[in-house]
């Protein structure tokens, strides 16, 4: 059996990390001696048409095609998937096409009804399901014997029994690294390698799509690999690829309390015993931050912590079911600071946060309180701009739907903001029209000013060791831009509290002030000089004056 696995992300230059699902599926199939090819369109930013062109000469040789879909966040994702599958069929491919991944699992019903050219959707963890699917295809067997599989039968969506989660994660083969090999060729050996030490989650946040994903399976919701097994994989990757940076994609890498401390201690000891020198990034919850645990992990190589803060307002934390209050959030940030982790961009040991400032129930007070804490802890402004993403199947989705808060995107074109190449639509109504006006103006300000800010930041990174007068000046200008986001938000808040209706005018004045400052300092000439001296392409530094969109 020849099998093709495609990471279904198009028109988007490589993500920050390898997709793990497709790597584990490839490893499971190869463990059963099947021939597997892995293809990642987004490494080179390929479109659907370019992807088909790259695969067309060999498509018909495959007995099964699997497509991994991490998210069906909006109608566009579904249309894109349908177009890709249709193009595969138009090339004359008549064999089995299956879809898998986190997003596909949650939206299997919608996918099967919309993308009629597929044969099945794998729901939940896919290693055992896809191997059973291959065996059934080989003997022309019945799909209804396979747990964790959904498909159409007589125009009716059939979902077989829920698949039991794999309890012993150590028995799973290490994920295949086809994508890593190409990433290292593309980015060099400093590229962060994706790895996981656990599966599932012990939290139940109302907005998180992991909860409905786990509801489609049975068995333990949170499982751990042994520390020995994790470090075995790290050592294998270090020895084979010469890598030293790792990105743990666990939903919760750090366990709370004594269990977290003991696991951190074991990890530190195992890494020291093998004399491995690595740096790694983790994701964790506020209630998992304990000083002794953080210090052990830092000693073992942890240089970055992503903390799911979500809000500095108690009402929001209750809405999201974070099971902590603002005092606990502050306590965790203080512990990280005591351990040497900072929220500032240039920090050697970095604390990053997840934050949801804008949602239907956002108030002027919650925004004001959030800005105050962002200033206090020097958190980058971009974290404040991302709206709540509302995923079908989540508790918060049902809440909003029952209260008619969700927007019908077929009838409405929602506001959206593009952060780090990802577009986030605002798929809900704001209950306070003043908050809606503030956010609309902030989006406009961001769209006008941020491209300039990012080009300056890119140049800063490329000439990180330079202390020339010009570099210091453009760095100060960039920091002034960063602070301007909080400044304008505070001014807009004050105007909204007074029920003023000139928020658009305020935003225009701020855009003009940045433009005036840029001309006064002759920023474009300064950057041109720096870039040419450092031989940086004009594509990086070429700029346009900030103007309202």
Image: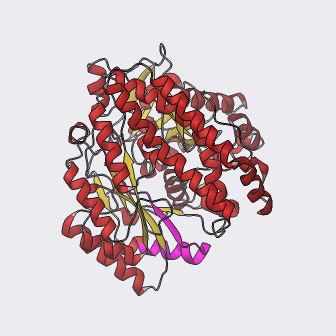
Can residue 60 be seen from the camera position used here?
A: no
Can residue 354 be seen from the camera position used here?
A: yes
Count the numbered circles shown.
Answer: 0
Q: Quadrant of residue 138?
A: top right
Q: Is residue 67 above or below residue 336?
A: above
Seen at 51% across and 63% down, the residue is 346
Residue in the foreground of this view, choosing between 227 and 365: 365
Q: Is residue 234 magenta?
A: yes
Seen at 51% across and 23% down, the residue is 114
Query: Could you tell whether 76 is left or right of 388 in the image?
Result: right
Quarter of the image with the C terminus in it: top right
Q: Pinpoint residue 268: horizontal percent, then vertical percent.
A: 36, 79
Q: Pinpoint residue 230: horizontal percent, then vertical percent.
A: 41, 70
Seen at 68% across and 42% down, the residue is 519
Query: Could you tell whether 179 is left or right of 113 in the image?
Result: right
Q: Is residue 172 above or below residue 540?
A: below
Q: Pinpoint residue 288: horizontal percent, then vertical percent.
A: 26, 61
Q: How is the image coloured?
A: secondary structure
Residue in the foreground of this view, choosing between 423 and 398: 423
Find the magenta span and give its range.
231-252
Q: Quadrant of residue 163?
A: top left
Q: Pinpoint residue 380: horizontal percent, then vertical percent.
A: 45, 51
Residue in the foreground of this view, choosing between 482 and 194: 482
List the single residue furthest toward the top: 411
Residue in the foreground of this view, choosing between 270 and 316: 316
């Amino acid at each position: 059996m020849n099998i093709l696995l495609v990471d279904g992300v198009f028109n988007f230059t490589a993500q920050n990390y390898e997709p793990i699902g497709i790597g584990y599926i490839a490893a499971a199939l190869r463990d059963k001696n099947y021939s597997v090819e892995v293809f990642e369109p987004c490494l080179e930013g390929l479109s659907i048409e370019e992807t088909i062109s790259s695969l067309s000469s060999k498509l018909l040789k495959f007995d099964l095609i699997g497509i991994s879909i991490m998210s069906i966040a909006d109608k566009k994702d579904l249309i894109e998937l349908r177009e890709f599958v249709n193009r595969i069929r138009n090339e004359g491919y008549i064999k089995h096409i299956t879809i898998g991944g986190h997003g596909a699992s949650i939206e299997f019903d919608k996918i099967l009804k919309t993308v009629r050219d597929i044969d099945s959707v794998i729901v939940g963890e896919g290693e055992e399901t896809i191997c059973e699917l291959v065996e059934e295809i080989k003997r022309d067997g019945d799909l209804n014997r396979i747990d964790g599989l959904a498909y159409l039968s007589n125009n009716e969506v059939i979902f077989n029994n829920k698949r039991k989660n794999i309890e012993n994660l150590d028995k799973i083969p290490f994920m295949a690294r086809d994508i890593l090999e190409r990433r290292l060729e593309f980015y060099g050996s400093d590229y962060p390698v994706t790895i996981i030490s656990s599966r599932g989650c012990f939290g139940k946040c109302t907005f998180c799509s992991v909860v409905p994903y786990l509801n489609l399976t049975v068995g333990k919701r949170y499982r751990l690999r042994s520390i020995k097994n994790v470090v075995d994989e790290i050592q294998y990757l270090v020895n084979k690829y010469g890598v030293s940076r790792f990105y743990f994609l666990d939903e919760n890498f750090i366990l709370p309390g004594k269990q977290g401390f003991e696991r951190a201690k074991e990890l530190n000891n195992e890494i020291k015993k093998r004399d491995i020198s690595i740096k790694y990034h983790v994701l964790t919850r506020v209630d998992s931050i304990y000083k002794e645990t953080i210090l052990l992990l830092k000693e073992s190589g942890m240089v970055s912590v992503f903390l799911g803060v979500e809000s500095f307002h108690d009402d929001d934390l209750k809405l999201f079911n974070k099971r902590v209050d603002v005092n606990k959030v502050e306590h965790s940030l203080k512990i990280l600071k005591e351990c040497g982790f900072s929220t500032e961009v240039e920090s050697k040991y970095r604390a990053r946060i997840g934050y949801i400032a804008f949602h239907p129930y956002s108030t002027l007070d919650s925004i004001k309180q959030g800005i105050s804490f962002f200033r206090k802890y020097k958190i980058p402004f971009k974290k404040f701009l991302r709206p709540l993403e509302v995923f079908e199947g989540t508790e918060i989705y049902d809440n909003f739907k029952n209260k008619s808060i969700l927007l019908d995107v077929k009838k409405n074109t929602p506001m959206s903001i593009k952060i780090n190449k990802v577009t986030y639509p605002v798929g809900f109504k704001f209950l306070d029209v003043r908050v809606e006006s503030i956010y609309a103006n902030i989006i406009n300000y961001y769209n006008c000013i941020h491209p300039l800010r990012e080009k300056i930041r890119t140049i800063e990174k490329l000439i990180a060791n330079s202390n020339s007068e010009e570099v210091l000046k453009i760095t100060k200008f960039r920091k002034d831009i960063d602070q301007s986001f909080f400044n304008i938000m505070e001014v807009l808040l004050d105007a909204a509290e007074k029920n003023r209706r000139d928020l658009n005018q305020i935003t225009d004045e701020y855009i003009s002030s940045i433009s005036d400052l840029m001309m006064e300092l002759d920023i474009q000439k300064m950057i041109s000089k720096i870039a040419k001296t450092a031989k940086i392409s004009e594509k990086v530094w070429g700029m346009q004056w900030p103007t309202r969109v």
